[in-house]
Each structure stands twice: as C-alpha cells, then as structure tokens.
Amino acid sequence: MSKRWSQIIFRVVALLIGLWLAFDLLARLGGEILWFQELGYLPTFLLRAFTKGGLWAIACLVTITFWFGNFAIAQRLQHQKPQEQDLSPKDILWGNWAARPRGLGLTRLLPLAVGLNFLVGVMLLYYVQAASRYWHSPSWQDILNFSASSLSPPQQLRLQAVWPLLVQLPSNLSQGVVLLGLVLALTIAPRFWLRAIAVLLTVAFSLTISGHWAEVLQYFQPTPFNSADPLFDRDISFYIFALPVQQLLAFWLTGLTLYALVSVALIYLLSGESLSEGNFSGFSALQVRHLQGLSSALMLAIAFNYWLSRYELLYFERGVVHGASYTDVVVQLPINTGLSVLAVAIAIFFLWRTLSGSKRASQAAPWLYSLGFYIGVAAIAGLVLPAAVQRFGVQPNELARERPYIQRSIALTRQAFDLEAINAETFAPTGELTRADLLANDLTIRNIRLWDTRPLLQTNRQLQQIRLYYRFPDADVDRYTLLSDEGGRRDEGERRREEGATVPAAPATEKQQVLIAARELDYSAVPQQAKTWVNEHLVYTHGYGFTLSPVNRVGPGGLPDYFVKDIGVDPTDNDASSLTTSSAGIRDSIPIGQPRIYYGEIANTYVMTSTKVRELDYPSGNENVYNTYDGRGGVQIGTIWRRWLFAKYLNDWQMVLTRNFTPQTKLLFRRNINQRIRAIAPFLRYDSEPYLVTADVTADVTADVTADVTAATPVSETSNDQNYLYWVVDAYTASDRYPYSDPGDHPFNYIRNSVKVVVDAYNGSVDFYIANPNDPIIKTWAAIFPGLFKPLSAMPTALRSHIRYPVDFFSIQSERLLTYHMTDPQVFYNREDQWQVPTEIYGSEPQLVEPYYLITSLPDNEAEEFILLLPFTPRQRNNLIAWLAARSDGENYGKLLLYEFPKQQLVYGPEQIEARINQDPIISQQISLWNRQGSRVIQGNLLVIPVEQSLLYVEPLYLEAEQNSLPTLVRVIVAYENRIVMAETLDQALQAVFQAEAPAAPVVRPFEDPAAPTEPSLAPTS
C-alpha cells in the first residue's frame, strides 16, 4: 500500500510540475504575443520565434539522433573480437604486421584513453563557452528577445582557437577542476558520461545555431551589393549573407563528427574491462569500418572548413595588410585549397573502405596512417610554410610585395565605412575676418554654444528637478525654428543699425540651437519608506515635461536662460500652462501639449494605469496633482485570465490579489526605450544617445502657430491628441564580413546609419524609418519583415526636420578617416600623413575633442545649416590639418565634407589655443583666484567655428562651488589670429577682438610668433 501511495504521490507531483512548467511557457509566450500585438509587430515576433524554435529543433534532433545512433551501433559492436589471420609472404615482405591484430598494453592503452578523454573535456569546455555568448539569462523573455544575432559565427575547433583555453587552465582553477573531473569520470564510467556530455553538447549546439536566426533569415533573402571582392570576384553579398551561415554549418558539422568519432573510439577502447585487465586486443573489422565511416564524415567536414578558410583570408591580418596579403594569396590560398581537396580524397578513401571492407580482417593501419599523414601535412603546409614565406620572402621587400594588397585594403575599408562619400576640399584661412563679416553671419554667431550638456545638467538637477524622484538623465543638442520676436531680436537689430552696421531685417522665423532635457521619473530615488507595491506600479508612473534652453544665452547670475522650464502650479486656473515658457513667441513655436513621459531612458519599472488609484502627475506647491492615463499604450489586463497570465509572466502575484484594478486597467511594460526597440528589432545596432524631440506631427514645422495649445485647457484635461514628445534613436546595420575592410577597434568592419527609430513618449508606439534605402542589408531586412520598416518620406515633416547626423556614426567614420584618408599605398605604408583627434582641457583635465553640433554656413554656401564638426591635427603635432563636417538639414542630410588646410600654412589647433589661454598671466591669474577654497573653474569645450574663410575659437568658463554644485557661466574666451580675449559675455569679447577701440573690461592678449620662445606681451591690444 505504501509503495502504491508513493507512486501516486510521485505521479501527482510530476503532473503538477509539468503543469506549472507548461503554465510558465504559456505565460511567457502569451505575454510576448500580447505585447507585440499591442505595438502592431506580431508578425515580426512570430517569424523570429518560429525561426529560432525551428533551428533549435532541427539542430537538437539531428545532433542527438546522430550521436545516440552511433552509440547504439558501438554498443552492439563493442564486444566483438578481432579475427586472427595468418601472414602471407607478401605481408612479411612488405612488413604489413598490422594484418594480424596486435593488442595494446596498459602502458599504451592508459595514455591513449586519457588523451581521448582530455580531448572530450576540451571539446565540452570549448563548445559550452562558445554557446554561452547566446545565453545572457535563463529567463524565457531574454531567450525570446536575445539580441546577439549580430555576433559573428563561432570559431572552428582548431588549435589556434583552443590554445587560449589551454593556456588559461593553470590560472583558471574552476575550469581545470572540471576538466580533470571529466577525465576521471570518463575513465571510470565512459558509457554514462559520454551520453551525458552528448546531451550537454546538443544543448550548446542548438543554442548556438538558433542564436544565429538572423543570419539564417538573411541567407534566404540576400540583396546584391553590385560590387565584387578583388580576389575571388564574388559579389560582396556572398560574404555578408551566405558565408556566415556556411561557417556556422561547418562549426556544427565539425563538432558533430569529431565527438562521434572520439566517443565511439573510446567505447571500443574501454569495452570488455580493457583497462582493468591491462590489455586491449585490438579493433574488430566491423569496428574499424564504423570508425572509418565516421572518419569519412569528419574529413568531409574538415574539407568544408578548409574550403571556407579560403574566403576567410579576406579578413585575415598578416603584416601590414588587413585582408589577403601576398603570402595569403600566393601561398596560403593554394595550401587551403589543396588541403580541402586532399581531405575530400581521404574521405572518399575511407568511405570506399567502409563500404567494401572485409568482415574478417581487422586492418586499422591504413585508417590511422591516413589520419596521421593528413595532420602532418596540414601542420607543415598550413602553419610552417606561410610563416617562412612571410619572414624570408615578404618582409625584406614588404612594400613592393604588398602594394596591390594595401591598395585593396584602403579601397574596401573606405567603401565599408562610407568614406568614399566624403567630398574633400581645401580650406585656406585668410585671417581677414571683420566685424561686418560677423554681422553678415549673425545666425552663426547667435548660435555659438556656450552651454555644454554637463554643466547644464548639473544646473538642471539643482533648479529644475523639483522633487527627488525626478531626474534629468541626459541633455541633447537640437535646433528649433522659433518666431523671431523672442529674446529682444528686434532691439538687437536696431542697436546695431545705430552703430552704422548693415543688418538685414529680422526674418519671421529663425533657427535656434538649443539643449533639451527630459524630466523623467526615477523610482529608485523615492524614499525607502514610500517604496510600496502600490506606489511603484500604480502611483509613480511617469515623468513630466522638459527644459529647453538656448545654447548661447545666459540668464541672471550666469545661469541658463530657459525657454521652457518648471511645472504648472495651479491646474484649476485655465490660464496656467503645464510648463512655463519664456515668451509668447516660445509658446507659439515650441509645442508642449501632453508633457507626460511614460516611456523614456530610465523608465525601468512596469506600471498599471486606469486603476482605482490615481497616478501622481506633478507636485503643485504643498500638494500633488493627480491624473489618469488616457493614452493608447499598454496591454489590457482587466480580465482575470490576463491578470493570472501576466502575474506569472512578471512573477508578481500582487496583480492577482489587488482590488485596485478595473476592467479598463492596462499594463505598461518595457517602458525603457532602449529595451523597447531592441525587443522589436534586435538585429540592428543602436546609437548610445536617444534624443527628445517636441514636435506637432499634425502640422508642418514651418507653419505659423497662432494658438497656444496649453493656455485654453487645464493640464489635467489636455487631450491625448496633443502629444508632442517623441524619442528619436539612430539605428545601424553592421557586419564584420566585408572583405579587406579594416575594423580597427570596432567589432564590425561595415556600418551604415540606415534606420531612424521614433518612440512616442506618451503612447509608446514605435516606428522604424529607412534613412538609407541604398544599404543592401536594410533592403534584406525590409524583405524579411515587410511590415516593420517605413520609408523616411512617411515620417511626419515636423519630426523629419529634427533628424541629425548621429555622433556615434560620425565618430566611427572620423576614427577610420584618421588613417584611411591616405589613398596612396606608399604614403599609407609609411604612415607619412596620419592624423589624430586633438585634445582640449575640460574642467582641468585633458580629453579628446568630441564632435559638436553647430549652426553655421559652410564655405561656398550662403545659408546657415545644422552641422556636426570635428577638427583633426597631424600625428604628434598640434596645428590643425583638417576638419570634417556632416550635414543634417533637408536634402543635404548625410553629406560629408572634409576641409583640408594647406600644409604650408600654420593654423592653430585646440591644444595650442589651450596653451595660450593657460599660459597667459592675466587669464591664468584670474582662474587661479577663482580656484581658491570653496569653488573651482571649469574650462568648457573649446569650439573651432568656421566663419567665412576664417576660424574663430570660443571657450566658456564656468564657476562651481565644491558643495551643492551649481555651475554658472562667468566668462567667455575668444581667440582669433593673434588675439585672445576673456570677457563677461561673448558679445563683449567679439567687440574687443574686431572693433578698432576695445572697451577696457575685456582682457585682450596678442599672440606671439609660435616660432619665438618668448612669453606673450602683457600689454592689452585695442
């Protein structure tokens, strides 16, 4: 009876566990389906899920069937004994002693068995380590949305790949212990452990293959590049779309056949208590045929590997060339081809012996000799010979040998990073800039950036954070079209006309470069006593509003002069605005509408809206204003079955127990925009800096706004249709398979900014727009997921006017341009003209100059535009050599211009200007006075600004207290030609530099001839 009850209890427990696992799977899958359905991307998810699941099933089924089928055959043949056979005169004459099976004693059997066991352990560690890249977390959600599809195929099991694993064994105690334990376990109980390891390797292979679902989908939808590699003359699409899948297949087949061969050999060697008896009598004829059949399959996999290794030479780096070099083309390529053909020949030989071999004779010698011969040839020809040719045939005359291959690497690297699209021109500063030129370039001068994001964010956190639970995670540079009546624009024009200057009439609108920062809710900053489930998920649901400030204006006390700031005070007052604006022109120019931010950069909690609990909207005086979400985002969880499903999905059982839900309750999760877009399109790479845009997508951005959208209604009654806050994220297509392209320090050697992603900050909707329709990779993804991408022309005009050339992409191109602007092979080989990014002093520490946005007119262009700029200096010198500009406006978006300075002309670089600033006695004395106890000076970014055919240098100085830091802008330094000025305002500094009689307040310093070692004069220059 007790045994019966034990069985019943066991079955009940097993049933309950099975039901729980099934419920878990259903909850995870159901939650994902409902989330993708809410966003309108369910077909995208289903295709990914079916592809990953299908690849997993195929890999698992084939692997486990192949291995366990061979185990079954080996189990049946393991007790067969080799047949004795008399030696014929021919055997004696030719020394064919292998015709008679001879046994192995313990002294040879034990090292052989231990060596094979060690090989099995190394294989397990290597393949599990390779598969670990595809397993970040055991949660089902991470498995479904894993974004590692951009990972390159794993390396084949070769000595070069395994050697680092073997080298680290002495220092990696855990791996060493595991490997030693596996060797002992396989020696004691080979049958059990070989099967257990087979299961683990099956999981590793299945995970690895399913992790490359993206490459498999691309394989069946390739788009031609219409450009061929110079060695094999194959379209580059083969290397981007086909070669990774073939490499993955080779990786799988090599591991599949090698483990089967080693495992079966171990089963035969250790069968019949051979170790305990100290003797192995030899392989039987059927065992030899089995081993030869597996060896034939292994040699075919090796042949496939060597055939693919021919193409892998295009990514190999030998000597000074990235890609196939002289040695690779002349020596390594024929060797790899020959080794592939030889492996096929040996495989055919093994297959012939397997199919036609004698059932009586146990002739293992040809099998072993063939394997040994191939290993020896591969080692000598594949490793020794190319190294010898490189050392003695290439290096003594390297440039002559490598010239055509250097040319290939230069050309294809420039193609892969889109450097060929750069239009190079000469820029020769004339040094003739006048006050009249500044007035003619008034928009450029009015947009010189005095505020950097770092001091602005620090000031925002002191003045605009309002409450502890609000945070400004970032500030972004953008441009907006404003009505020109703001900020005294007309008064400034009148004043300049009185000075006798010719000033054009103020336009109706003008571009203004601004810094915009989102005020997001940071739940981690809520006091610990208030961190309850209700507060986390029902009350603290969203951030509120943003700040908008011009980059060039300073308010009272040296603080930022905000266009948009604060939070509304009295929602019952119909004249109260949700956010405070500085003027009527700003209210008419900057759409505010719905300022609530439910989806942002730090929104890491899931929330429930439309519940019986009111959501905290914003603080108003000593009280709080509450609101109920009425947006389109979120998954309905009003029904009981959905509450149970998401309770399991999120492991939050309070969702089942709470009485605060209503039939209209929605669940908003994945509110972090970075997680959100990666869950939808994990095959893209994303920019590190999403930026906030406020835009009225229902009207053209250039249309005159005649109504205040916030003054007519209270904040709490603002319509959902008035949502104007959006996040814009740049996305990239990338590959590490572009032939001959040098990746530098990047994990890819091809990249394009092909997609712009827009996320609604209130509703959470996500739209993907194709920004580069000429990119073959994005064409392939658009064919795979036809409902995912939209043309850029479908983006609302108001949003399209805010797209900008991304800093990350620009930085990558700039880094490659430092070397690959040299197109002559000899100049490239000698590195005669290598550039570098200059350094500047920020705060008090040197740092590399970062790309920065400007509104300026480029040479030979009359209209000002929004550009991204970065200067360059020669390697180991400090003078400017060139600057790169990326255009962002209208039809010029994406165009790159490189302006090179004449090499015979000295143009001051940032480091030289910084040296002049910090060596000037008066300026340095003033900085030292400010740097006394209790405060410190922050030297801001030094901007190099092109104006007409000249360069203007501007650096702001901030002052901050050591305690409760609140940076204020206290001085502006301007340098031009031989003058340097420090003044309270930019306008004063410019007047001092460019007017005949400078006021006494600014400090004007002349530059000495840089060739002279003397200190600059102390006398002010008028």
Image (spheres, grey):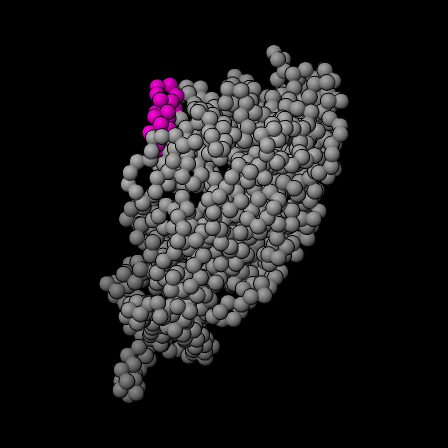
Which residue sits at x=61%, y=13%? Answer: 621
Residue 599 x/y as whole percent? 61, 33
**Left/right of residue 436 with respect to residue 105 in the rendered view:** right
Q: Is residue 976 magenta?
A: no
- Closer to the camera in the image, 132 or 621: 621
The vertical placement of 218 against 453, above or below, is: below
**Left/right of residue 117 with respect to residue 250 in the rendered view:** left
Which residue sits at x=57%, y=36%? Answer: 439
- Closer to the camera in the image, 921 or 815: 921
Total of numbered circles in the picture? 0
Quadrant that contains the C terminus: top left
Residue 218 x/y as whole percent? 59, 58
Q: Main secondary structure of the magenta part?
A: helix
Q: Quadrant of residue 472?
A: top right
Q: Quick check: can you spot residue 107? A: yes
Q: Quadrant of residue 57?
A: bottom right
- Closer to the camera in the image, 214 or 763: 763
Which residue sits at x=49%, y=49%? Answer: 884
- Closer to the camera in the image, 289 or 967: 967
Chain part drawn in magenta: 918-936
Which residue sits at x=35%, y=63%? Answer: 319
**Left/right of residue 611 with respect to residue 944 in the rendered view:** right
Q: Is residue 932 magenta?
A: yes
Quadrant that contains the N terminus: top right
